[in-house]
Image: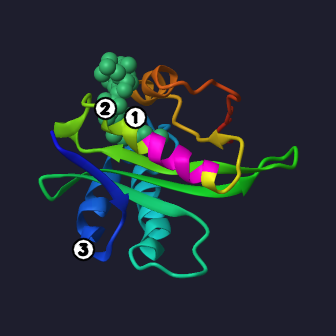
Amino acid sequence: MDVQIRPVREEDRHAVMELVSQLTEGVAEWRDPDAVVEAARQWLAGYFTPAPEQSGAVFVATAGGEVVGMVSVNTHRHFTGPEEAYIGELAVAPHAVRMGLGRRLLGTAEDWARRQGLRHLTLETAAGNTTAQRFYAAVGYREEAVRFTRVLE
Ligand SMILES: CC(C)(COP(=O)(O)OP(=O)(O)OC[C@H]1O[C@@H](n2cnc3c(N)ncnc32)[C@H](O)[C@@H]1OP(=O)(O)O)[C@@H](O)C(=O)NCCC(=O)NCCS
């Protein structure tokens, strides 16, 4: 598959919004999966048109003119002080998984982070998303923290 990775454009809006519907994978039963998708869509909405005030970036993978994957990356401050890169969303179309696109998209986000002069790239994934956990471990990411939640009666 001849894959190109490039910054997102306005014409990608529909395809990217479709891809993020997969971000409910493994979401905890006490969270609203629709709210997860809606939050991602709202965050991405500002990125289809380049604007000087944008602090992060969104990239898409295309094959034969079709958007088959996306990644968003931004910065945030770790509680110990340093500014870090942070992956907001990463999704590959179901028919295009296990072809190396996830790895390439992450690599593009890593290059972006290096260009910002950042030393760490971090992300969170749902405890139930075992596919993503296997993927991140396979492409060189190391587990750093585990978050616990108690649902209060
Ligand atoms: C997680 C995801 C982005 C991986 O994308 P991908 O394009 O399939 O990943 P790659 O093809 O680059 O895989 C790289 C390596 O990761 C590992 N990997 C990927 N998917 C895996 C799976 N389902 N099971 C076990 N290992 C897996 C493998 O080691 C793989 O290398 P290999 O295919 O040579 O064995 C994709 O499955 C996806 O979009 N899932 C739904 C959305 C999601 O959960 N996003 C992450 C939210 S934080």
Q: Which residue is mark 2?
A: 100
* Residue 25 visible in rendering: no
What label does residue 94 carry, if any?
none
Magenta region: which residues? 106-114
Residues under numbered marks 2 and 1 in contact, where contact means CB atoms less than 8 Å apart:
yes
Please indicate whether residue 18 sits to the left or right of residue 23 in the image.
Answer: left
Secondary structure, mark 1, is: helix
In percent of width and height, residue 75 lies at: 66, 57
Secondary structure, mark 2, is: loop
Q: Along the line of sight, which residue is nearer the eye, 27 or 65?
A: 65
Q: Residue at x 42, y 46 (%)?
A: 90
- Amino acid type shown at disc 2: Gly
- Amino acid type shown at disc 3: Glu
| 129 w.r.t. 105: above or below | above
Q: Which residue is mark 3?
A: 11
Choose top left, top right, bottom left or bottom right for residue 92. top left
